[in-house]
Amino acid sequence: MTTKQIDYCIELARTQSFSRGSENLFVSQPTFSYQIKLLEDEVGFAIFERNGKGATLTPAGAQFVTYLTNMREEMKRAIEQGQNFSAKYKDNITISLMVRQALYFLPEAIQIFEKSGSGVQITPLFQYDNGLDSFLKNESDIFFALKEQTKQLAGVNVHELFDSHIYLIAKKEDPLAKKNLITDEDIYGRTLMVGGGSPSLLRSIQAKLISSGKIEYFNSPDHDTTLTNVAAGKGICLAPGFLNDHSGQFAWIPYDCKDTFHCVLVTHRHDTRECLMAFVKTLQKLYKDAVAFPL
């Protein structure tokens, strides 16, 4: 299977016309049709049902083209990354984190690191669910984590980064948004969004509030859904400060709790590159200097 055959197949699925498909890709129609036939012979099933007006996908073909489209997009990104890398960089560091806002100072750290002339590219990898597994498979070089996640890990180095407090998220016009500190009593009588992959510390606080019998609660599958529900007025939620994108869309009010999330960076012990440690130290310094920054 060639990349041209993949492109021809995706284009035919889109246009359902051999003549338009070949015209769009600047090849003759016989060449276009022949390559589609070669592809079908190779995979061993009919991808298209021919008719007088063109071609439509068979059920097997529809599934196949979905996979081809995803594969082609991945290939395109890989080529673009390779082009970027070969033009300017001599090495690459991949950092995995669950969401962009988890490391608020990441863009600034990349900018500082670029100016140092290291010739090393920093590639963020956003993995909401499987970041740890990906890191353990050596698919990333740095993993942003909560310290509790690192207790059973072997062969890694753990670098302290910052402590993140717990906040209540509400609509800006919510009466709670006027408070400087939220207590349990403030939450009583309200609907609290819970779940959504919450860390163990947050789950224990949610469970305590639910067990009081003084709140309603609503299960939410992930943080983005939770924020959507908060924006829709369905409730409020508690969240670690490192999830705050500081966009001003919501009110983030400190919650009266001494417990904090210990945020760290994890690297592979076998990775002894000086550039890796230099980037970790760049991030550490940014957070250390941001004493007054709400986290």
Image (cartoon, rainbow, N blue to C red):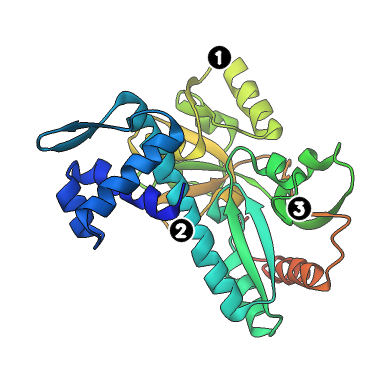
Q: Mark 2 points at which residue?
A: 76
Between 268 and 67, the one lying in front of the other is 67
Callout in the foreground (2, 1): 2
Dot 1 alpha-carbon crowd within 10 angstroms: few under 14, some 14 to 19, many 20 or more = few
Position above or below: 202 against 268:
above
Residue type at mark 3 is Val
Between 17 and 239, the one lying in front of the other is 17
Question: Does the CB distance between marks 2 and 1 fall below 8 Å?
Answer: no
Q: In which quarter of the image is residue 175?
A: top left
Query: Mark on residue 264?
Result: 3
**Disc 3 versus disc 1: distance between alpha carbons?**
35 Å
Residue type at mark 2 is Lys
Callout in the foreground (3, 1): 3
**Disc 2 versus disc 3: distance between alpha carbons?**
33 Å
**Disc 2 versus disc 1: distance between alpha carbons?**
53 Å
Question: Does the CB distance between marks 2 and 3 fall below 8 Å?
Answer: no
Q: Mark 1 points at which residue?
A: 213
